[in-house]
Image (cartoon, grey):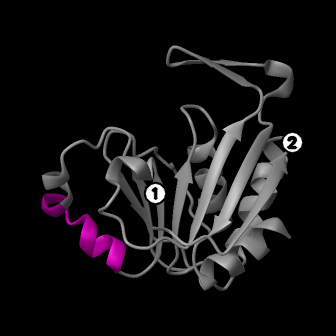
């Protein structure tokens, strides 16, 4: 059972607001070594938000989605960042073989997309962001965007630890 210490609903009306929220979180001294869960449908903006956060942390060069590789790691000045995407994860044996337990217990920031696909394997998270693209219509696995409202997101942010509460404060500032 996950204890939720605090919940806030955030609205990011456009891509600039999404970027501003990521930049605010990047300035938080509590960010390292947090574990942040990112939930939401296909095309909701999880990876987009991660890219903004990584840029704000000083990552340069190409930032790849870990959809096929499951894990992409980065070394910004603030410390290591590990970006997981468990969308295609289906075999718990993969968990041990890939060394995910050690990475998640180690240093740095851990960002996990599709955490529900690794339920029961993840350590206690600090913050959960449930992102919904308010402009997208999802029909049978496809995403149809409303061009005029593109980038408009609603986020349910939940602090799951004292560190998560500090991160939520920074994110909502």
Q: What residue is shown at x 61% (from left), y 83% (from top)?
A: 163
Report the front residue among 4 and 117. 4
Mark 2, Cα crowd under 10 Å, few <14 / some 14-19 / many 20+, is some
Quadrant in the picture for residue 29: bottom right
Q: Which residues are magenta?
A: 96-105
The reply, left or right, for residue 166 in relation to residue 58 is right
Local packing at callout 1 (Cα closer than 10 Å; few below 14, some 14-19, many 20+) is many
Nearer to the camera, 60 or 7: 7
Q: Are marks 2 and 1 in contact (CB under 8 Å)?
A: no
Q: How many numbered marks, from 0 up?
A: 2
Disc 1 secondary structure class: strand
The Cα atoms of the two marked residues, 2 and 1, are separated by 23 Å
Residue 171 on image: x %, y %: 76, 67
Q: Earlier in the sequence, mark 2 or mark 1?
A: 2
User: Whole-percent x and y of residue 37?
Assistant: 52, 59
Q: What type of secondary structure mainly makes up the magenta span?
A: helix
The quadrant of the picture occupied by the N terminus is bottom left
Q: Quadrant of the C terminus?
A: bottom right
Magenta stretch: includes residue 163: no
Q: What x and y, as percent, mark residue 99?
A: 20, 66
Q: Quadrant of residue 131?
A: top right
Q: Which residue is mark 1?
A: 112
At 58% across and 79% down in the image, what residue appears? 161
Circle 2 residue: 13
Q: Is residue 40 left or right of residue 87?
A: right
Q: Secondary structure at mark 2?
A: loop
The answer to whether residue 119 is left or right of residue 110 is left
| Residue at (72% x, 77% y) in the render | 27
**Who's the residue at 35% across and 72% down the image?**
104
Residue 99: in magenta span: yes
Towards the viewer: 134 or 76? 134
The numbered dot on residue 22 is none
């Amino acid at each position: 059972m996950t204890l939720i210490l605090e919940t806030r609903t955030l609205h990011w009306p456009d891509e600039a607001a999404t970027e501003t929220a990521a930049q605010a979180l990047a300035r938080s001294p509590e960010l390292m070594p947090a574990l942040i869960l990112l939930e939401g449908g296909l095309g909701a903006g999880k990876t987009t938000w991660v890219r903004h956060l990584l840029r704000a942390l000083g990552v340069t060069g190409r930032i790849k989605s870990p959809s096929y590789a499951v894990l992409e790691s980065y070394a910004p000045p603030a410390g290591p960042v590990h970006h997981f995407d468990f969308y295609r994860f289906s075999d718990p044996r993969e968990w041990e073989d890939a060394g995910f337990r050690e990475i998640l217990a180690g240093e740095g920031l851990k960002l996990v997309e599709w955490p529900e696909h690794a339920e029961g394997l993840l350590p206690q998270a600090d913050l959960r962001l449930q992102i919904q693209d308010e402009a997208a219509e999802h029909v049978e696995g496809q995403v149809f965007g409303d061009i005029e409202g593109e980038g408009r997101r609603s986020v349910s942010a939940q602090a799951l630890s004292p560190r998560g509460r500090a991160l939520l404060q920074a994110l909502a500032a």
